[in-house]
Image (tube, grey):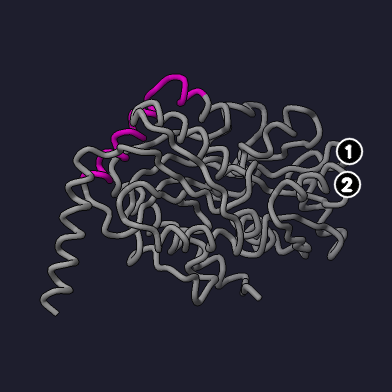
Amino acid sequence: MLRTLAALAAAAFALAAAAQDFPTKPVTIVVPYSAGGSTDIVGRIMAEGASEVLRQPVIVENVAGASGNIGTARVARATPDGYTLVTCAIATCAINTSLYANRGFSIEKDFETVFYVGGVLNVLTVGSQSPIKSVAHLVEFARANPGKVSYGSSGVGSSTHLASAWLKTLTGTDLIHVPYKGMAPAILDLIGGHLTMLIDNEPSILPQVKGGKVRALAVAGPQRSAALPDVPTMEESGFKGFYVEPWFGFMVPKGTPKAAVDRLNAAFNAAIQNPKTRKKLEEAGLRPVGGLPSRLADQIKLETDRWAQVIRDNNIKVD
């Protein structure tokens, strides 16, 4: 027993000592989703910005599957030395808590929060060839065609699913959910006319809006988007309090030395203050926030409680 305690103490001391000179080798950020989505875009922008501050490569590794649970679980088991982080998103860190009985990890027990990047708006869209020109028109069309209006999502329980489910509840319409393995194929089907509507994160849908392939009806935030100034908010469209703003942050395994956490937090804060990095984030539709590690912890608590209610109201279950 004494030998075990001594070994644990020695290991903890070694990690703490190594953290003083952190980092001395490349840092890896695991993005628990496929490449090309909003989580991946934000992760890569922040990795590049932090790399300049840390003077070490910051590598992004995509480990997709199970709505982000597989990649997140892998990081929960990683060595707690600060060299492996996971991107924390609204689904993996808040929504999934109410959807999965066993994710293979606990946000509270297995992770330390490092940094809150900020949030992005969700955008309600239809295909550019659709006759629907407003949210009111969409609701009217859905009521006149029950069971014939479809919406896509990146999977059951994703923020894109829950946002549309919430709209379905508020309007009392019969909308058909079509889940996909990621937003890229859903966007293609929207463009092709195989889906009626899609609520997606602004960073991933914005190029299609700007390119004229899809039409934005509204943004789900308290204010209009700087990238889409002519598109009204859901509140302006008659849905008071309809805010869906997916957010992003970074976590490390529980037990990571405070010196390493503080160094990473400082590097990310410096990155979002860098005009070059900040411009990339804003052009992607993200509103940078930053702050102490506790800012992310607060966000996780707030959103976990909020989406648990939406899940209960819509009786959403993961098969």
- Look at 23% across and 51% down and name the residue there: 257
Q: Looking at the figure, which quarter contains the N terminus? A: bottom left
Along the viewing direction, whichever of 42 and 228 lies nearer the viewer: 42
Q: Around disc 1, counting alpha carbons within 10 Å, would you say few (fewer than 14), some (14 to 19), or many (20 or more)?
A: some
Q: For the residue labelled by badge 1, is the local secondary structure a helix, a strand or a loop?
A: loop
The reply, left or right, for residue 35 in relation to residue 277 is right
Residue depth check, mark 2 versus mark 1: number of the one nearer the observer:
2
Question: Label 1 is placed on what type of residue?
Answer: Gln
- In the image, the segment drawn in magenta is 259-279
Magenta span: predominant SS is: helix
* Residue lying farthest to the top in this orientation: 275
Asked whether residue 104 is drawn in magenta, I would say no
Residue that badge 1 annotates: 129
Mark 2–mark 1 distance (CA, rounded to whole Å): 8 Å
Along the viewing direction, whichever of 250 and 211 lies nearer the viewer: 250
Q: Which of marks 2 and 1 is nearer the N terminus?
A: 1
Looking at the image, residue 288 lies above or below residue 199: above
Residues tagged 2 and 1 counted as in contact (Cβ below 8 A): yes
The reply, left or right, for residue 194 in relation to residue 235 is right
Residue 6 location (% of width, % of height): 12, 68
Residue that badge 2 annotates: 193
* Residue lying farthest to the front in this orientation: 3
The reply, left or right, for residue 3 in relation to residue 67 is left
Q: For the residue labelled by badge 2, is the local secondary structure a helix, a strand or a loop?
A: loop
* Residue lying farthest to the bottom in this orientation: 1
